[in-house]
Image (cartoon, rainbow, N blue to C red):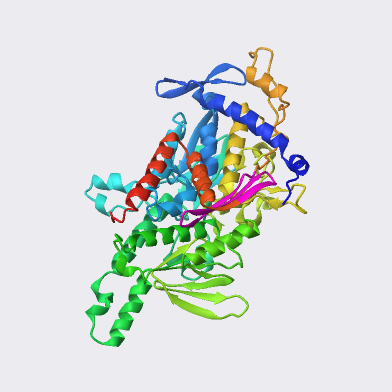
Amino acid sequence: MKFNTKNFLNNLPIPSLIFAGQSSFNDSSTISKIPPRKKNGKFRGQDKLKRIDRPREARKTVVVLGTGWAAHAFVKLASTYDLRVVVVSPVNHFVFTPMLASASVGTVEYRSMTEPIRVTNPYIDNFVEGRAIGIDVKGKKVQVRLSDLGTVTGSLQGLASNAACRLDPEPVWSQVIYNEDGTMVQRDPSQGAGGVIELEYDHLICAVGTAARSTIVPGAKEFCFNLKTSQDSKRLRTAIGEALEYASRPDVQEYYYDDDESKMLATAERRRRVTIAVVGGGPTGVELSGELKDFFSQITRASDGAYQHLKDDISVILVHGGSDLLPAMDRDLRQRALEALSEQGVDLRLNTRLSEVGRDFITIKEKGTGIEETIPVGITVWAAGNAPVPFVKELLNNLPPEAAGSGGRINVDQWCRCLTPTPETFGSILVLGDVACFEAQDKFDDAPEPLPQTAQVAGQQGAFVARMLNRGYDMQMTPPKLPELSESEAFSLLRTWLVARGLEEAPGFTFLSLGLLAYVGQEEALNQVTLGNVPLFNYSGKIAFALWRSVYLTKQASTRNQALIAFDWLRTETFGRDITRL
């Protein structure tokens, strides 16, 4: 195909690239600033817009809900000179979610791709381990149910060994009711052992992410493994190890029985125990299928495989409701994904819906024909869709009806603000990431479409909002503007720089897509590289695998993570994946 340089240059998002470069320069200066001084345990910072010292109490309080991509990007760039940042999340770390599939089979260790949120920005005011369960939009207060730290508190009573897992990823329902005078919070005492506290805010960053949408299929919530958190990957890795040992027990070996019928039943049961069904043909489902085949290929090798006796029994089934895997990618890459997984022996069930999930089976129905089939399985993994967490529903109940977006998401404007009941509270709640529904349209689209629920979008939104709040824009105004300075206030270099760039008014958020990546197993990946809406190149194979690893390595949260991931890859290549069950 002939490359048209003129069309390529005409379609390049030049303004977005220039703005991104200038913003990156500003970000680097924010990160490299001298940390604020401590006095009596409190931070004291300097307002960079007005160049005046102010104590912690005078800074605006920003409560960040979540530690995912959007929240992590915001916290990393937030200026603690100007903002008092409090992070609330049931987990105290950020996880590089694209590598959860790798962690679930031991290609990398899950701790290698996580970063504690306190390390992301050591100068945040506080981190609160808990879940947001209620909100008073008019009073600018959010209610948080504190996590029950049973491992620590239980050890004081000799109960540590029986402590509940504090990283339970499932959302917890709780009802919070204000008294008429608004002074106290009542709650259902049956909703967990953790206490409920209130946090006041000037700005609330809602970046709580989504939960697995497994309730749409009977039995899926009860019997499916998810793959959204580091704890999910740890659970799945444990389950896979148990399945291998379960299938190696004598009671499912042919030599244990004399008659042919018992031998056939033993063989069928052994194969069921190591049959893994993956539901969903998106990036998570495809990458997990590829990683599983890599893992099983290693442990069943004839030379040194620890489970050589299960080579003919292990199977991976991928169930997808569409006709193509990875529907967001170009057709040639979708076709290559299909071919690569088929060549590795993955049992692909396309145009097929999951009807029911049981403890040891799944029922699927083929579209068009309506033919149902029940397949015995040992493990079922849900990677087929997302649903809003309960707090999002609670928040929508306190917002105008127009705030409700598609798929349970919250509509936002181009500055990530959602509608609020009163003009006084407008601009106090900013919604980011998978929760936000922002419709954008470019010259190639016939109509506006919501931005995809991807890590790229979330990360860019988090950095965008951090810049706006760092610069002190008045978020109640449309568009947000820099506040007017009095004559008594000092000259501001930051303000001069923003005015020189024409940023007295905050520009709207513009998503700059950099493409899509996916791993399909056997050291083969798919790369669809773009710059905005301008396609650059598509690659598949070994070269694409090298680029895939390079991108994932450079996108890690810190140099520490990069070193750990590189070491994990080297260890896996040299010694194989660890099959120890701890």
Q: Nearer the viewer, residue 240 or 11?
A: 11
Does the magenta run of residues contain 465? no
Q: Which of 511 and 231 is in front in this view?
A: 511
Does residue 509 sit above or below 241 in this rendering? above
Left or right, 230 with reference to 332: left
Q: Quadrant of residue 427?
A: top right
Does residue 460 sit above or below 581 in this rendering? above
User: Residue at 69% across / 13% down in the picture?
Assistant: 487
Left or right, 365 with reference to 167: right
- Residue 119 coordinates in the image, percent (x, y): 42, 34
User: Residue at 74% across / 51% down in the picture?
Assistant: 448
- Residue 478 coordinates in the image, percent (x, y): 73, 36
Magenta: main secondary structure equals strand
- Residue 393 coordinates in the image, percent (x, y): 57, 54
Q: Can residue 537 be seen in this view?
A: yes
Does residue 501 sit above or below 358 in this rendering? above
Give the magenta range.
513-538
